[in-house]
Amino acid sequence: MTKDYLFEIGTEEMPAHVVSRSVKQLADRTKKFLKENGLSFSDIKTFSTPRRLTILVKDLAEKQDDIDEVKKGPAKKIALDKDGNWSKAAQGFVRGQGMSVDDIYFEELKGTEYAYVHVQKEGKKSSDILMNMSEIVKAMTFPTKMRWGSYDFEFVRPIHWMVSLFGSEVIPVKLLDVTAGRKTQGHRFLGDSIVLANADDYEEALKSQYVIADADERKGMIINQIQELAAQNNWKINLDKGLLEEVTNLVEYPTVFAGSFDKKYLNIPDEVLITSMKDNQRYFEVYDENGNLINHFISVRNGNSEYLDNVVSGNEKVLVARLDDAQFFYDEDKKYPLSHFVDKLKDVSFHDKIGSVSEHMARVKLIGNFIAKKLNLSDQEVADFERAADIYKFDLVTAMVGEFAELQGIMGMHYARLAGEDEAVSAAIKESYMPTSAEGDLPATTVGSLLSIADKLDTIITFFAAGMVPSSSNDPYALRRSAYGIVRILLNEDWSLSIKEILPQIIEILNGETSAKLPKDRSEENEISDFIRDRVKQYLQVSDYKYDVIDAVLASSQQDPIQMLAAAKTLQTHHDDADFKPVVESLTRITNILKKAKFKTNNEVDDSLFDSQSEAELFAGVNELQDQEDLAISDLYKGFVELQPVIDNYFETNMILAKDENVKNNRLAQLAKVNELADRMGDLSQLVIK
């Protein structure tokens, strides 16, 4: 027999961002708990609102399965000692079955007598096991926790009630001073308390008291109401997923409404209006049919439609107060030239161990100029970059960004446009912050990409030099995100740069030009280049490359993300080809021979020491590959496919470690040339081949 089991934790209002993950955690922990206790069930359904985390376990067995089986133990000669007493092995065997040595009997199996016990055990009742649900609650984790009363116990918010019903039976789970029963609470303002007769009554009973417990149903109601409102007014609404999730977890009974504000505020940049509405008030912004932002907003009330006019009016007043502030900041900032703000950056700290923002910008300009020359960017692009680098942090000291910190870069772009700066310069100011998250949007312009890379490189270099290196669990300055951003931008722009090569050159350029600490030796430089190189691994993992391909590429001496990605693409593309295994085996054999011989000298190959045709053939094949300028990794691999029979023939007809020292070193040098080319693809010994 089975019954459904309902368990609800009723709390004070939880932060919206923890609700979904918390109810999932409750379900996952319960699932594990039930499986560990041998209780079968068909499914676990979740319910959640700002005031409750609930699970409904469907078709939960009323008890554990009974046990009726024979257990085989140690052989009789081990179970009994020479005096006929029970050994520790025998005692341990029965103890593990919850029985005593008196229950042992012996039977012969294939000529040997073994100890056996007949285990008969009635399964525990589910009602007894479910009393331990309090332990699941105690084990739950949250980003922030609260204590209340005189208790040491911590939870996301104080717990006010619990419901625990197995069918119609109350399972009186106790936690602190709260004992679970059958009473739950309706909407805080519109509903009353409810006494549940049965676990399956939960969802409909709450609906009668203005609580939509199913989060997906609540979300669907919000979407439908917004779409109806938009259709009635010919509006377009951006249903931002994050905001939709948040408002879903802010209400128990959603009613959508629209408000408006004076059109005069539309002169403020859209991003300011959207931030005021979305980030500060949890409103959805509204667009006309042409995609232009208009003076309306949509919000969601936690309640029904009664007195909705008062709700609309109150929300409009709150928003207008914010927009008045934004208008004031905007008007004040426009009174000053950009130079007014740029001069202030001398007194703004980038970091107290590194220096001012102004000094940071000066270093970024030097780094960007160096990279621009490496990439052969045009004179106009360089000029635009230099202008952007001179001013791009100016909006940090504007009144608007002082109030809306999330608009840094964005307001810089708008103010630069108003000041008559070229569009390339203005756009680069915003794009210098991109990507703002691991997989966020990338700069769309060349100048913006260059400025972003230079900014992030200087940040990583100076923070590492100042000893602020991320640990495995701590990265307070988001340096990993900066490094990942560098990798993504390089790949997006198809810019070929070896970080390991350019880093010493950048540091040399900065020496004497800054008071900030810089890496003092090659080991510190390698730490930085390896840190950035490791973000290529992150990129390849996100892009679903095979683990062995990633390991092979990362193990090479290659530090150019473009070349590393090309190598990964090539190895992944040909991984299952018929000729992949022989090519990899041939090249791996060369690597192993060189390692075993500890051959490191990069001597030129002397063809006068050849004494077989195979040596000349390999020499010609390698030279042909080396002579091709800008040889693509994909073409290099094709070259190795053609060269593979030549390599195998070389091994068959030559003794690599010849007695003649000159011949031996010449042959090793020839293999080293092959290995040097192969290293461009990675350490092929890391590949798993079949």
Image (cartoon, grey):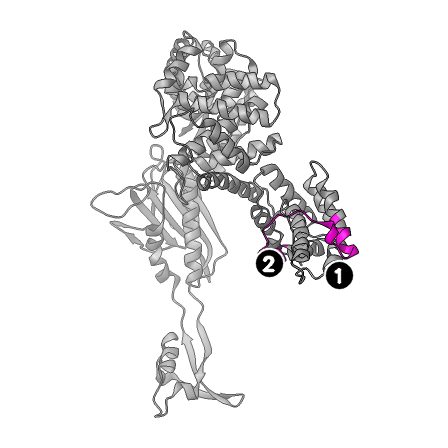
Task: Choose the circle earlier in sequence order: 1 or 2.
Answer: 2
Farthest residue toward the bottom? 83
Based on the picture, tell me whether residue 290 belongs to the magenta stretch. no
Q: Is residue 156 left or right of residue 532?
A: left
Residue 195 appears in the picture as rendered: no
- Residue 469 shows in the view: yes
Q: As drawn, is 550 to the left or to the right of 311?
A: right
Q: Please, what secondary structure does the residue beneath circle 1 have?
A: helix
Seen at 37% across and 19% down, the residue is 402
Between the residue at mark 1 and the residue at mark 2, the CA separation in whole angstroms equals 19 Å
Please give left or right for residue 623 compared with residue 257 in the image.
right
**What's the residue type where badge 1 is placed?**
Thr
Asked whether disc 1 touches disc 2, contact meaning CB atoms under 8 Å apart, the reply is no
Return the x and y of residue 682 as percentages of the image width and height. 61, 47
Q: Which residue is mark 2?
A: 597
SS for callout 2? helix
Q: Which residue is mark 1?
A: 653
